[in-house]
C-alpha cells in the first residue's frame, strides 16, 4: 500500500475482499449446510463486501462516505434475501436484488474513480473502473434475465446459479485484488515521481548518505553549486566539501547528535572543486525504517554566502566611518580595551592621542562641505600613514580623531610619532582647483599606565591635554600632566561604552 501517513482505504479493501471470499465459500457449500447461511448470509456478505470496497475507494479518493451504500443498501438487501428465501421463495427476485446491489455499487465505484480529472492515479483508475464496470454490467444483464420468465428455469437451477455466483465471486475477488493493487502502486509511483521532482528541482542542496557517511545521492543543485560531477561524489564522504575549519570536537558532536537519532543544524564553511569557499547552513536528519533503525542521513543545505557577506558589510558600516573608512568610536573603544590588555601583559606603554583639526571649520564655511569632506579624507590618510599597522586611527566626530599607539617601548617613540603627525597635517592641501588649504592639528596625549589605566579616563585626559594645546597656540602636541587621575567622564564619552 502507499507509503504515507494518511488513510488510504486499504483496510476497507481487505475487509471487503474477505467478505467476498467467505460468501463464495458459503455459496459453494449449498446443499450441505442450512439455506439461511448459503443464501441470506452469503449474499449479504457479497453486498457488504462490495460496500466496503466502495468505502475504501472513497477514502482512497479523499471523498466523503455514502450513507446509502454503507448502511441502507446492506440492511435492505439482507431483509429482501431473507424474505424471498424463507417467506416467499423466489430465486429470480433474489438474483435481481443482488444484481441490482452489485450494479449500483459498481456504478458508484466507477463514478468515484473517474470524478477527479486531476488525480495523479487517474490513468490506473481507468483500469480499475473498467473491471468494476464490466462486473456491474454483467450482473445488470443477469438481473434483467432473471425478470424474463422464459429464462426462469435456467436461472432457478441450483447448480447453474451456484456456479454463476461462485465464479462471479472468484472473478470479483481476483479482479479486485489485482486492480486495487495496480491502483495503489500507481499512486505510490506517482507520489514517488513527485517527490523525485521536488528533490531534483529543489533550490536547496540535498545530500543523502548511508549510516557510514558515504554519499548515495546528491541532487543537481548541489552538483551545480560545488562544481563536482555526480560520478565524483557518489561513494565519497561529504568531507570532500569541507574547508577543514571545523574542529574534531565539532564533528564528533555532530555525529553524536545524528547517531542518537536527532537532527543536527549548523553552518559549514565549505570549498568548491575550484577551491572557492562558500558558506552553507545545513540541517542533517536521520531517516529511520519502521523498526526505528537509522538507515540513511539526509542533509538539506542553503547557500548563505551572500547573507554572510551582507552581514559583514553591515557590521563594517556600523563600526567604520562612511567618509574616511576609519573605525568609529564604538570600534575604537573595543580596540583600546584589547590594546591596554596587551600592554599590561607585555609590560609596555600604550598611548591615546586626541587629535583636533585647527581651522577646519573655516574650510567648510568658505569652500563648502564637499571640499571639507575631501580634506577630511586626506587628513585621515595622512594620520594613518604616520602610525604602524598595529596602531589604530579612528574618527569620532566632525574634525576629531583618536589614535591608539600600542606596545610602545618608550616615551621618545611616542614623541617621534606625535611630531610626524603634526607635520603631516600642516602640509598644505590641494583640493580640486581650490587654493591651498592650510589647517593644523592640536594633539593631546595620555599614557598607559603612567596617566591612567581605564580606557575612558585615558581618552578624557588626552582630550584635556588637546585643549591645553589650543590655549597655548595650536599646531602642537602635549602630554597629560594629570598623573593617575580619573576625572569626570563627559556624557559624550560615556556613550562610547
Image (cartoon, rainbow, N blue to C red):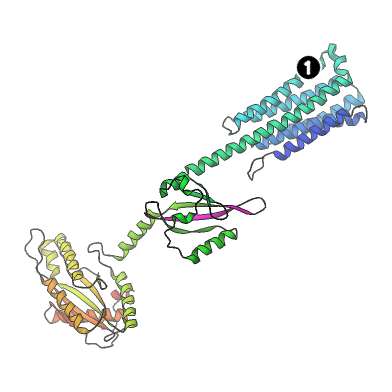
- Which stretch did the figure color magenta? 271-296
Q: Which residue is mark 1?
A: 144
x, y percent for residue 93: 84, 21
Is 87 located above or below residue 271 in the figure? Answer: above
Q: Is residue 274 magenta?
A: yes
- Residue 399 visible: no
Number of disc labels: 1
Is 193 located above or below residue 138 in the figure? Answer: below
Q: Secondary structure at mark 1?
A: helix
Q: Nearer the viewer, residue 344 or 226?
A: 226
Q: Nearer the viewer, residue 55 or 407?
A: 407
Residue furthest left as drawn: 435
Does the magenta stretch mainly form a helix, a strand or a loop?
Answer: strand
* Quadrant in which the N terminus appears: top right
Residue furthest bottom as drawn: 483
x, y percent for residue 22: 83, 34
x, y percent for residue 203: 45, 46
State the image quarter where residue 6 is shown.
top right
Q: Is residue 212 magenta?
A: no
- Residue 9 visible: yes
Horizontally, residue 292 falls left or right of residue 481, namely right
* Mark 1 Cα shell of 10 Å, populated few (<14), some (14-19), many (≥20): some
x, y percent for residue 384: 21, 69
State the image quarter where residue 343 is shown.
bottom left
Amino acid at each position: 500500500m502507499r507509503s504515507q501517513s494518511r488513510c488510504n482505504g486499504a483496510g476497507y479493501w481487505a475487509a471487503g475482499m474477505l467478505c467476498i471470499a467467505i460468501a463464495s465459500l458459503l455459496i459453494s457449500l449449498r446443499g450441505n449446510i442450512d439455506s439461511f447461511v448459503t443464501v441470506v448470509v452469503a449474499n449479504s456478505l457479497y453486498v457488504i463486501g462490495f460496500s466496503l470496497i466502495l468505502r475504501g475507494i472513497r477514502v482512497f479518493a479523499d471523498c466523503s462516505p455514502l450513507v446509502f451504500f454503507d448502511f441502507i443498501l446492506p440492511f435492505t438487501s439482507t431483509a429482501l434475501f431473507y424474505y424471498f428465501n424463507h417467506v416467499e421463495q423466489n430465486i429470480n427476485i433474489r438474483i435481481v436484488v443482488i444484481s441490482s446491489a452489485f450494479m449500483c455499487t459498481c456504478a458508484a465505484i466507477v463514478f468515484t474513480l473517474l470524478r477527479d480529472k486531476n488525480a495523479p492515479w487517474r490513468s490506473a483508475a481507468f483500469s480499475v473502473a473498467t473491471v468494476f464496470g464490466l462486473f456491474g454490467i454483467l450482473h445488470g444483464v443477469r438481473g434483467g434475465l432473471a425478470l424474463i420468465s422464459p429464462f426462469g428455469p435456467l436461472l432457478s437451477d441450483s447448480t447453474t446459479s451456484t456456479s454463476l455466483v461462485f465464479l462471479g465471486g472468484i472473478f470479483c475477488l481476483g479482479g479486485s485484488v489485482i486492480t486495487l493493487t495496480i491502483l495503489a502502486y500507481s499512486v505510490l509511483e506517482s507520489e514517488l515521481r513527485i517527490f523525485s521532482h521536488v528533490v531534483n528541482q529543489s533550490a536547496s542542496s540535498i545530500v543523502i548518505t548511508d549510516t557510514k557517511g558515504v554519499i548515495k545521492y546528491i541532487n543537481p543543485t548541489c552538483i551545480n553549486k560545488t562544481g563536482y560531477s555526480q560520478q565524483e561524489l557518489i561513494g565519497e564522504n561529504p568531507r570532500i566539501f569541507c574547508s577543514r575549519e571545523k574542529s574534531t570536537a565539532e564533528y564528533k558532536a555532530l555525529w553524536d547528535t545524528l547517531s542518537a537519532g536527532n537532527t543536527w543544524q549548523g553552518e559549514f564553511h565549505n570549498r568548491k572543486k575550484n577551491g572557492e569557499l562558500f558558506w552553507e547552513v545545513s540541517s542533517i536528519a536521520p531517516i529511520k525504517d519502521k523498526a526505528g533503525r537509522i538507515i540513511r542521513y539526509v542533509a538539506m543545505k542553503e547557500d548563505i554566502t551572500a547573507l554572510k557577506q551582507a552581514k559583514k558589510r553591515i557590521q563594517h558600516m556600523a563600526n567604520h566611518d562612511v567618509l574616511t573608512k576609519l573605525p568609529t568610536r564604538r570600534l575604537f573603544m573595543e580596540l583600546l580595551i584589547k590594546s591596554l590588555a596587551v600592554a599590561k601583559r607585555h609590560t609596555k606603554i600604550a598611548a591615546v592621542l586626541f587629535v583636533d583639526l585647527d581651522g577646519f571649520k573655516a574650510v567648510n564655511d568658505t569652500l563648502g562641505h564637499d571640499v571639507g569632506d575631501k580634506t577630511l579624507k586626506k587628513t585621515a590618510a595622512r594620520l594613518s600613514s604616520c602610525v604602524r599597522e598595529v596602531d589604530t586611527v579612528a574618527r569620532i566626530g566632525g574634525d576629531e580623531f583618536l589614535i591608539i599607539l600600542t606596545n610602545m617601548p618608550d616615551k621618545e617613540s611616542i614623541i617621534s610619532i606625535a611630531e610626524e603627525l603634526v607635520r603631516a597635517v600642516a602640509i598644505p592641501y590641494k583640493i580640486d582647483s581650490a587654493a591651498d588649504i592650510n589647517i593644523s592639528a592640536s594633539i593631546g596625549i595620555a599614557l598607559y599606565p603612567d596617566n591612567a589605566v581605564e580606557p575612558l579616563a585615558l581618552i578624557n585626559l588626552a582630550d584635556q591635554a588637546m585643549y591645553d594645546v589650543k590655549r597655548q597656540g595650536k599646531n602642537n602636541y602635549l602630554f597629560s600632566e594629570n598623573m593617575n587621575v580619573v576625572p569626570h567622564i563627559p556624557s559624550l564619552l560615556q556613550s562610547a561604552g
